[in-house]
Amino acid sequence: MPLLTITSNQKRDDALIGELIEKASETVAAMLGKPERYVMVSFNHNPQMRFAGSAEPLAYLELKSIGLPAERTAEFSQILCDTVSQQLQIPADRIYIEFSDAQRHLWGWNGSTF
């Protein structure tokens, strides 16, 4: 199950967050070639974030998935930066992304593991 967590110091209204989460879910499913029914997206507002000595708009993303192809993370970074930048009006150079390839036996779902 891919999990994309988006944390930003920017407060947004529920409608905009809903649009972002919907777009991000579709994007992650397409990027990874996985059914969207397995994709989870979370948005966290944290006003106490700074980057490069500034509290200007920023975002930190974590994409975790089983079988995350390491050779495609640069491509995924571009796609996710574009998506978040467009949806939240945050410059791409103010977005960090952490990628994590989860081991099947350490990822649980539906009372079992993958």
Image (tube, rainbow, N blue to C red):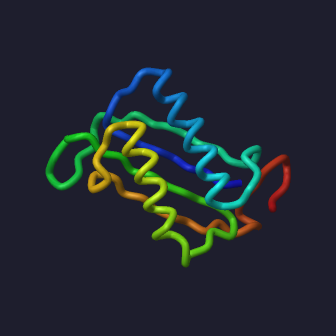
How many numbered discs, if any? Answer: 0
Farthest bottom residue in view: 71
Residue 108: percent from the left, percent from the top? Answer: 76, 55
Residue 18: percent from the left, percent from the top? Answer: 54, 28
Q: Residue at x 85, y 48 (%)?
A: 111
* Residue toward you, 82 or 65: 82
Q: Residue at x 55, y 36 (%)?
A: 21
Residue 11: percent from the left, percent from the top? Answer: 35, 28
Q: Residue at x 62, y 44 (%)?
A: 25
Q: Is residue 71 above or below residue 55?
A: below
- Side of 80 where 30 appears, left or right: right
The quarter of the rendered structure image containing the N terminus is bottom right
- Side of 37 where 89 appears, left or right: left
Q: Is residue 71 above or below residue 3?
A: below
Farthest right residue in view: 111
Residue 19: percent from the left, percent from the top? Answer: 53, 30
- Side of 97 where 32 appears, left or right: right
Q: Residue at x 71, y 60 (%)?
A: 33
Q: Is residue 14 above or below residue 55?
A: above
The quarter of the rendered structure image containing the C terminus is bottom right
